[in-house]
Image: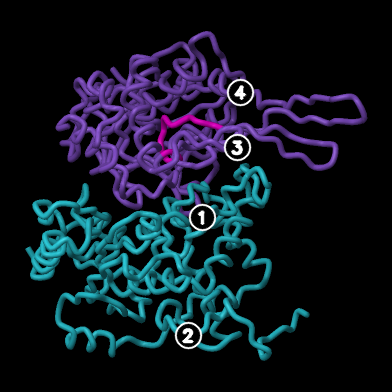
Chain colours: A cyan, B purple
Amino acid sequence: MSEMTKKMQEIAREILVKGEAEVVIGWEKGTFWYLSPPAFIDKPEDVQRLVWDDFCHNNLSKYLVDLKNHEGKAAVFVKGCDSRAFNRLLQDKQIAREKVVLIGIPCPGLLDQDKAKELGKNSDLPKAQKCLDCQYPNPLVYDYYLGDKEALNEVAATKEAADYSDVAAIEAMSPDERYDFWTKQYDRCIRCYACRNVCPACSCRECVFDQTRVGWIGKANNSSENQFFALTRAMHVAGRCIECGECERACPMDIPIMLLNKKLVKDINELFGEYDAGIDIEGKLPLGHFDKNDPEEFM
Amino acid sequence: MMKTILKAKLPEMLEQLAKEYKVLVPAKLEGVSRFAAYRENLELALDENVTMPPKDIFFPQTEEMYKFAAKDQSLEIEEIPQDEKLQVIFGVRSCDMKSIDCLDQVFLTKGFSDPFYQDKRDRSILIALSCVKPMESCFCTSMGIDPQKGQGADIQAYDLGEKLAFEGITERGQEVLNKVSGMFAEEDAAIPPMGEFNLTANVEGVPEKLKNMFDHSIWDDISRKCLNCSACAYVCPTCHCFDIASEVRGEDGVKIRCWDCCMFDEYTVMAGGHQPRPGKKERVRNRFLHKLRYFPERYNMLLCTGCGRCVVKCPVNLDITNVIKKIKEA
């Protein structure tokens, strides 16, 4: 058992015994060695299920949306990305701060599950792309903090500036090439909505894609409806996407969804100034306030 | 004696068949493995089962049922012509062969015959392909399936490593083999033994036990991490729920039927807005009760073939073998 897993279990036990929270949300081992899905722990005797390893991918802040109308408190383990998601939900008033106990975990970057499956145990596995792109491996908000802060500040300090070369490659395409590229990607979308449902930025009480009677989107699976879904989803999480990459990991059809999200992050940076969602909860939201100097070339 | 062919010569054989039939094969296409119409240079996917099951060949995700036009007081209905060509579907694994049996039960028995499904089913000649090495997510034997014998196949193909062997089962299957008989060698071939399974599930007594478990606390526990997406249902070879909708533009419209999933809000919401399955617990419970209790009650078979697709694709690893284990232990 790793040192961090031991610490997780200890703090979870303490929180449950003291009654600081009714449930602790963490990760546990799944069906295969490279899966560490979410775990809900209610009883101190169950804390030994909790684990911290290279595959704790799920962004647990998503589950706090489920607990919005619940009485009582929940404790949740947060990596850097989970904490950004938490902050962003807080800004949207989706969660009450006092109802959540946050346990911060410094994240060294997780490993690529698909590669793990392909290459097997004991092989040299690459980090997940979303983790290579991550600028904030350390939790930004927490009530408890597990691990060595100094060591992780070093990790954070070595982070290079955000890399948008993948987005630039798409931007460099001609409109026809680009249309062709995205048509191919989204023609295989099965509209299972795993990307939406796993996303901590998707917190609408009623999603536009579920209002089928209104007719925003048809039920048919075809290029037109799928692209409408793709674009609307991406635009709707713009300014709220904290780049945890869960949408892309969850996609059963391996659609490069983060390319769309990153394009919007890049656009927001260029149009409204540098902005990373879920970092500064006091700061103004680029798409959530009006500024006379905002660009309006389209008007 | 079996009819054998080198795997390297398989494209040639498929090419030959494609002159006569529509030929569907497991292929890697735009990043996903699925059944696709055979064409030259198509990348075949024969090492592992395909990500998308053959379900959509018979029951497409979106199917146009008929067109209509409403002018003044009159209504015109226009049927949509169906493809009439026979289709040969090559490389269906035993789990997916069983799933076609499940779909047949729903769409063709108990006094109902779904014309859209029946048409495609009647035009299909199925070539099952035996497995040699299970994927780590496979558990078909736990579901009573023989991974080397596809139930309901017209032709059974066996994976011999370098070669494939073919055995005609039905008359229609034999006819297909006759078209390419010149390509085969006749030889005694030993079918390699099946490898060890990594995943198992013990379903004995589960449908009966579930009769008294509707209100069991197990569903709270199982459903908590579920995201209520439909990744499991849409990659499932047996999930068959659908919704019928109209797409209307001006005076013209088309009736379509599309896959639906019991995880979605709209699936159960009723006229007036009442939602009998409001949350994760009710929806997840319905999913597993349907697979493990209601379907066995109605059709005397489980609605799970152990293909393991949902185990692989669920974003939160809600694993049906684990659910079965929890039911047994409850």
Residue range highlighted in magenta: B233-242
Question: Where does label 4 land, which residue?
Answer: B116
Question: Where does label 3 land, which residue?
Answer: B62
| Same chain assignment for discs 4 and 3 | yes
| Same chain assignment for discs 1 and 3 | no
State how far apart marks 1 and 3 are (Cα).
27 Å
Question: Where does label 2 land, which residue?
Answer: A283
Which chain contains the residue that carries disc 2?
A: A
Which chain contains the residue that carries disc 4?
A: B
Q: Earlier in the sequence, mark 2 or mark 1?
A: 1
State how far apart marks 4 and 2 are (Cα).
57 Å
Mark 4 or mark 2, whichever is nearer to me: 2
Determine if residue A126 is in view.
no
State how far apart marks 4 and 1 are (Cα).
37 Å
Identity, as a three-letter code, of the amino acid under mark 2:
Gly
Q: Quarter holding the C terminus of chain B?
A: top left
Identity, as a three-letter code, of the amino acid under mark 1:
Arg
Q: Is B234 colored magenta in this rendering?
A: yes
Mark 1 or mark 3, whichever is nearer to me: 1
| Residues at discs 4 and 3 in contact (Cβ within 8 Å) | no
Question: Where does label 1 land, which residue?
Answer: A205
